[in-house]
Amino acid sequence: MTTSSIKKSLAVLLATAFVAATASVQAQTPPAAAGTTGTNAPAATHPKRERLIWSGTLTAVDKTAMTVTITKKEVEKTFQVTSETKIHKAGEPATLDDGVIGEAASASYRKTADTNAVPKAVSLRFGPGEKKPEPPASNTSTNKVQ
């Protein structure tokens, strides 16, 4: 073999190795997610925000500021009430006017990055939790096949 043919063979071998390595890397890269721009920049996604619940005693309702304060074991937490906040009392839709200071209450809210901000309540419940209907009493004498 001549030097020229060795160089050509080496060039073909290197080109083949380069193409094989590139194809291998592309096969390992996951396809672009919906909403990406086609670049290597990640898509703007919203991380799953954890919903938390704070239960205790209703200690304040401020209709002007649209806030409620619920105290649990001497720790107060104030929640912002918005137009999206779902409020219930005894399992029925309610308003801030239905909240009675001193009664049981709970707020469902989402954790935010700003720990100093007043959390926005996703839902509020005034009063004791919903009572589940009792199952009907079984009367064995009427259930017998005769």
Image (tube, grey):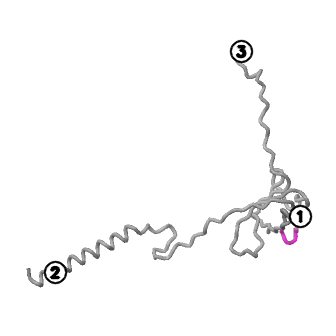
Q: Nearer the viewer, residue 65 or 145?
A: 145
Q: Residues within 10 Å of mark 2 (few under 14, many from 20)?
A: few
Q: Earlier in the sequence, mark 3 or mark 2?
A: 2
Return the mark for residue 59: 1
Residue positioned most to the top? 146
Picture quarter containing residue 119? bottom right
**Residue 122 appears at what percent x and percent y?**
74, 63
Q: Secondary structure at mark 2?
A: helix
Query: With 27 as the anchor, is 145 left or right in this view?
Result: right
- Left or right, 9 with respect to 146, comes to left
- Which residue is situated farthest in the left direction here? 1
Circle 3 residues within 10 Å: few <14, some 14–19, many ≥20: few
What residue sits right under mark 2 in the picture?
A: 8
Span shown in magenta: 62-67
x then y, percent, for residue 39: 46, 76
How far apart, in angstroms, are the residues tagged by discs 3 and 1? 60 Å
* Residue identifier under label 3: 146
Seen in the image, is 13 located left or right of residue 118? Answer: left
Q: Toward the viewer: 73 or 101?
A: 73
Image-quadrant location for residue 58:
bottom right
* SS class, disc 1: strand
Amino acid, disc 1: Thr
Earlier in the chain: of badge 3 and badge 1, it is: 1
Q: Amino acid at mark 3?
A: Gln
Per the picture, the main secondary structure of the magenta-coloured stretch is: loop
**Residue at (81% x, 68% y) in the render:** 77
Q: Position of residue 22 (x, y in %)?
A: 33, 73
> Within the magenta stretch, is there residue 64?
yes
Labels 1 and 2 touching (C-beta < 8 A) = no
> Who's the residue at 16% across and 81% down the image?
8
